[in-house]
Amino acid sequence: AGAAGATLLVPMPLPDLAAGAAEVFAGTVLATETFEGPPPRRLLLTDVTFGNLVVLKGGLPDPTVTRRFAGGRLGRRRLVVEGVPEFAVGDRVLLFGAPGRNEFCDTLGFEQGCYRAGPEAGTGRAIAADARERPVYGFDRGFPLLVPPAPGAAPLSFAALLDHVRGLLPEAPR
């Protein structure tokens, strides 16, 4: 076991994420590669490669993009950095990218800059979820609603989330 630390996240509403991100894209995780960073810390880092990109903001000219996140598993070592999203091959995500802005996480606002597409129980419909896989039912003052606002309310579809973000980015491709 190693030393523990803390991550303090300043709450960021969706419009601030959209405005502040250098890039906004939906993509599917094609590969992950965990390695040991340079001394003296030798922090575990994971490069995540995304493909099947839908670019909403920024210039991503290649069909894939790789972004770096602190944490991962390498042999018997495992590092979890609170607030840094974790990824598995096949995950479909929406990222508000800020590559190089922070040494621990290439998304703006850490996990706040990551939304997931997950299957809705019973229907299999692709719904929007936050980085911790909690369904998103909408937004209130830019913050995700993680509980149904009314009995029987359905979570947002992942496609509706993308449309909502497009509406925040007037320069976004349609």
Image (cartoon, rainbow, N blue to C red):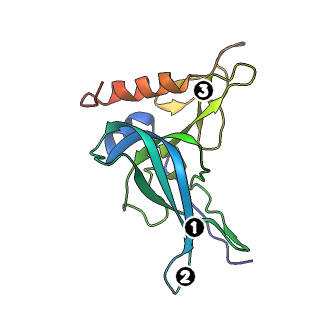
User: Can you give x and y, in whole percent of width and height, for residue 41 in the image?
Assistant: 54, 82
- Residue 59 visible from this viewpoint: yes
Separation of marks 1 and 3 at Cα, in angstroms: 28 Å
Q: Earlier in the sequence, mark 3 or mark 2?
A: 2
Identify the residue position indicated by label 2 in the image. 41
Q: Secondary structure at mark 2?
A: loop
Q: Would residue 22 be found to the left or right of residue 104 on screen?
A: left
In this view, the mark in front (1 or 3): 1
Per the rendering, the mark at residue 127 is 3
Give the amino acid type for the residue marked by disc 1 in the picture: Thr
- Please indicate, yes or no, whether residue 8 appears anywhere in the rendered image: no
Which is closer to the viewer, label 1 or label 2? 1
Task: Measure the C-alpha gap from mark 3 to mark 2.
Answer: 38 Å
- Residue closest to the eye, 107 or 150: 107
Which numbered disc, 1 or 2, marks the residue that appears first in the sequence? 1
SS type, badge 1:
strand
Asked whether disc 1 touches disc 3, contact meaning CB atoms under 8 Å apart, the reply is: no
Earlier-in-chain disc, 1 versus 3:
1
Determine the residue positioned at 49% across, 64% down.
Answer: 104
| Residue 64 as seen in the image, left or right of residue 135 | left
Which quadrant of the view contains residue 80? bottom right
Q: Amino acid at mark 3?
A: Ile
Residue 31 pos. (x, y %): 54, 55
In the image shown, does 147 or 95 lie closer to the viewer? 95
* Residue at (48% x, 21% y) in the render: 160
In this view of the protein, which residue sits in the foreground, 16 or 117? 117
Marks 1/2: CA distance?
15 Å
Report helix, strand or loop for mark 3.
strand
Residue ID for mark 1: 34
Q: Nearer the viewer, mark 3 or mark 2?
A: 3
Q: Which residue is found at the position 53% from the left and 27% from the top?
A: 158
Answer with left or right where residue 83 lies relative to residue 108. right
